[in-house]
Image (cartoon, rainbow, N blue to C red):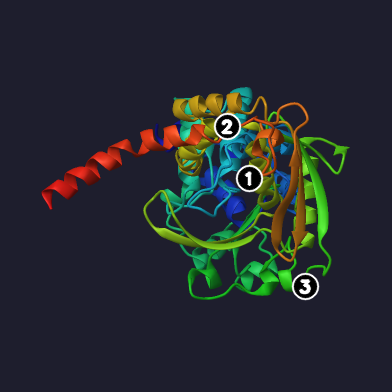
Amino acid sequence: MAANDVKKVVLAYSGGLDTSIILKWLQVTYGCEVVTFTADLGQGDELDAARPKALQFGIAPENIYIDDLREEFVRDFVFPMFRANTVYEGEYLLGTSIARPLIAKRMIEIANLTGADAIAHGATGKGNDQVRFELGAYALRPDIRIIAPWREWDLLSREKLLAYAEQHAIPVEMKHRQGGSPYSMDANLLHISYEGRHLEDPAAEAEESMWRWTVSPEMAPDAPEYVDLEFAHGDLVSINGLHMPAHELLALLNRLGGKHGIGRIDLVENRYVGMKSRGCYETPGGTILLPAHRAIESITLDREVAHLKDDLMPRYASLIYNGYWWSPERRALQTLIDHTQQAVNGWVRVKLYKGNVKVVGRDSKSDSLFDSTIATFEDDAGAYDQKDAAGFIKLNALRMRIAANLASRKS
């Protein structure tokens, strides 16, 4: 499809400088009608500029979509991911990755609603997001045309972007003229990510002023705080007895964790495109939720089921990181994971203190597999016959005993 064959395009639009330039570039280069889509995933004030700026570019009001996706995001993407205790490369809680399939889904829905034949995004050709957006879009609408300006234009420096903005009368905030933010940031209800500029040196410590959601552990309260989390079928349903929608629960966990300096990480990750990338992340709510969920599973899941989940988790994490949320293999894994969660019901008590989360209690009235009459170190009244242990130990040692005997004869 040539540029002049594109009649209408749905643009993932934030209202910031880059996507404003992309909007104008689409109008100039493709001569097409533009539909703007802004996803409210909990990033707050960043959304305020989207509508007035879109109107300023001549976008028809009916072609401006600003959708509150916070509940769907947490309920249908974040919580299913945490049912698997998902961590990528041992540290990353996938705050950016898990938002992309939802954005792709909604872009395709809007394209179908508006009769658009293409979608466009502002992800660069170096990053993971281009892969996540496009794999999701193709999975949901195989015939969609995708326009990725960073792979087409020559505006590959800040100076060229600012010159293009000036040429086309695109308003530029003073901070961009003075060099812009020292970081590239992405925010949603699960996390804030920081990349670029100062952080491109992996040996340099991030400035304290960078962090937005969390206080430093040194400045956190001197007294610990205890929080009770209730789970039903593997999902968080209440905090300290307060039942509320999923996105409000996560927002409350973020505030509790941020207050106590919880959830900061600084890592170098392996990107899908092959390069290593340094980033800093704030994920206070997720950092609390992960060990709490594992704690309720520890008393409600069968041992081998729990171990199977642990074996599968790295594969599941890689699927999300690499953009395969809508793939058949991720869906199949999700079916298995969700099946394991039917008995994951109960409460967990966590202690928050100076950047740390410690599980200090857990219970499940209806589904606990913990049997104190068997586990006790006191008299168990015959509930467990310790003599039984000798037989299974000898059977499990048999192959090693045979090998040791053979080695002894050879020597």
Find residue 99 and report its image quarter.
top right
Q: What residue is disc 1 on?
A: 13
Q: Secondary structure at mark 1?
A: loop
- The first of marks 3 and 1 along the sequence is 1
Quadrant placement of the N terminus: top left
**What is the three-letter code of the residue carrying label 3?**
Met
- The first of marks 3 and 2 along the sequence is 3
Q: What residue is disc 3 on?
A: 219
Q: Along the horizontal axis of the image, is 151 left or right of 209?
A: left
Residue 190's tag is none
Q: Say which of 82 and 158 sits in front.
A: 82
Q: Secondary structure at mark 3?
A: helix
Q: What residue is disc 2 on?
A: 385
Residue 389 visible in the snapshot? yes
Against 321, is 62 above or below? Answer: above
Q: Say which of 239 and 37 sits in front.
A: 239
Residue sitting farthest toward the left: 410
Q: Residue at the location (49% across, 25% down)?
A: 332
Residue 8 visible in the snapshot? no
**What is the three-letter code of the residue carrying label 1?**
Tyr
Q: Say which of 57 and 205 sits in front.
A: 205
Q: Residue at the location (66% across, 32% down)?
A: 300
Q: Residue at the location (53% across, 76% down)?
A: 204
Q: Along the horizontal axis of the image, is 402 left or right of 100?
A: left
Q: How far apart are the two marked residues, 2 and 1, measured between alpha carbons?
A: 66 Å
Find residue 237 and report its image quarter.
top right
